[in-house]
Amino acid sequence: MASRSADLQVEGLVKRFGEVMALDGVSLEIASGELLTILGPSGSGKTTLLKVVAGFETPDAGTVRVDGRDITALPPARRDIGMVFQNYALFPHLTVERNVAFPLEMRNVARPEIERRVAEALGLVELGSYGKRLPRQLSGGQQQRVALARAIVFNPRLLLLDEPFGALDRKLRETMQLEVRRLQRRLGLTTIFITHDQEEALVLSDRIAVMNKGAIQQVASTTEIYERPANDFVADFVGESNIFHGTVTEVGSVTLESGRRLLIAHSAPVGTRVGVLMRPERFGQGVNSFNGEVKEAVYLGSSLKLRVACDDGLELIVRQPVRGPLPATGSRVSIAIERESIHVF
Ligand code: ATP
């Protein structure tokens, strides 16, 4: 299948529903062949953004461009966009083949070409021998693969996926994530994937756009989002975090609101108000040390998670490799962190 993947630019999108500002000035660019995940909590505007891109909602302001062409006013059927939603929405009375053929029939593609492309699309999602079945004769994961085949069979310019694996169990969801990634790379499909699951976003994405309250908080690569979040919201939403606020009192040193000083590898000038982020798994050796009492200890199989009340008033979540028995609640511990492991924002 030759790729016709386009790049996409949305600019200044605004969409209000009565009092609710579903999109509050959203701008994004996605390169041809890229997979961008929109990650955000429920109600943050993810689906509304996708609907505006697909043409099911008209924005109050802003533009949608595909390969530089303004399509903001174009009806959905003329946008050449493939879509998969959480509730697969296959036609229940049509066989798998007929479901996948549907977008080609709508486009008046010739019968032999339809047959060839349906077979190819079903092959790509590894359902080559399931063509004659009805949707109800398939598992949830298989139905979602049919929906995926139907979304890519007409060689769309963009692929939009709205929480497509939300209804699947964890194991199947992980398999499907890898499958979508493989397919998306192989076909070079420009793809927007919506999820509220941060792990899913980290597994799948080239870049992640974190959304909250109708606004994009940060758009960056997966490592950048995790290691160098732009603000409290992103730091807190993606991964576990210990976040504090303070003021730079000397270059290379922050005094937190609790009075505790931390040495940092950041040269913000004296007087700057900053946030600091310490990821739980980053504790180990280091110049910043803490003594405290274990308030809670949880065994997670591959690691231990401790909640430690430090003598200087901070409460820290710490992850440690499992070496020996679980520390007892109330026991004393010492932990430390390097300055390089503290992210300052
Ligand atoms: P979820 O993860 O729960 O699907 P979301 O991030 O996709 O959430 P949206 O569905 O885009 O969020 O909704 C954003 C806001 O706009 C919400 O407050 C929602 O209630 C509101 N909203 C969305 N569609 C409509 C509509 N047709 N009429 C009124 N309000 C709407």
Image (cartoon, helix red, strand yellow):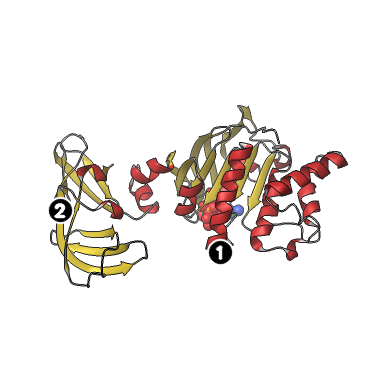
Residue sitting at the far front: 324
Instruction: Compare residues 308 and 26 and report the one nearer the observer.
Output: 308
Look at the image and tell me whether residue 139 can be seen. Answer: yes
Could you tell me residue 87's position as x and y percent?
Answer: 65, 59
Quadrant, the N terminus: top right
Distance, label 1 to label 2, CA atoms, is 41 Å
Q: Any atom of ligand 1 within 8 Å of the CB at mark 2?
A: no
| Residue displayed at 22% across by 63% down | 308
Which residue is disc 2 drawn over? 289
Could you tell me residue 167's position as x and y percent?
Answer: 59, 62
Q: Which mark is residue 27?
A: none
Would you identify the image quadrant in which residue 295 lies?
bottom left
Instruction: Compare residues 133 and 93 and report the one nearer the observer.
Output: 133
On screen, residue 168 versus residue 89, left or right, reads: left
Could you tell me residue 288's position as x and y percent?
Answer: 16, 49
Instruction: Compare residues 201 and 107 and report the one nearer the observer.
Output: 201
Q: In this picture, is 140 found above or below 9? A: below
Identified by mark 1, the residue type is Asp
Quarter of the image where ligand 1 sits: bottom right
Residue sitting at the far top: 68
Mark 1 and mark 2 lie on one chain; the one further toward the N terminus is: 1
Could you tell me residue 132's position as x and y percent?
Answer: 81, 57
Q: Residues within 10 Å of mark 1 (few under 14, many from 20)?
A: few
Would you identify the image quadrant in which residue 10 lies?
top right
Look at the image and tell me whether residue 19 can be seen. Answer: no
Badge count: 2
Which residue is disc 1 drawn over? 169
Q: Residues within 10 Å of mark 2 (few under 14, many from 20)?
A: some
On screen, residue 196 versus residue 316, left or right, reads: right
| Residue displayed at 67% across by 33% down | 3
Identified by mark 2, the residue type is Ser
Q: In this picture, is 241 found above or below 154? A: below
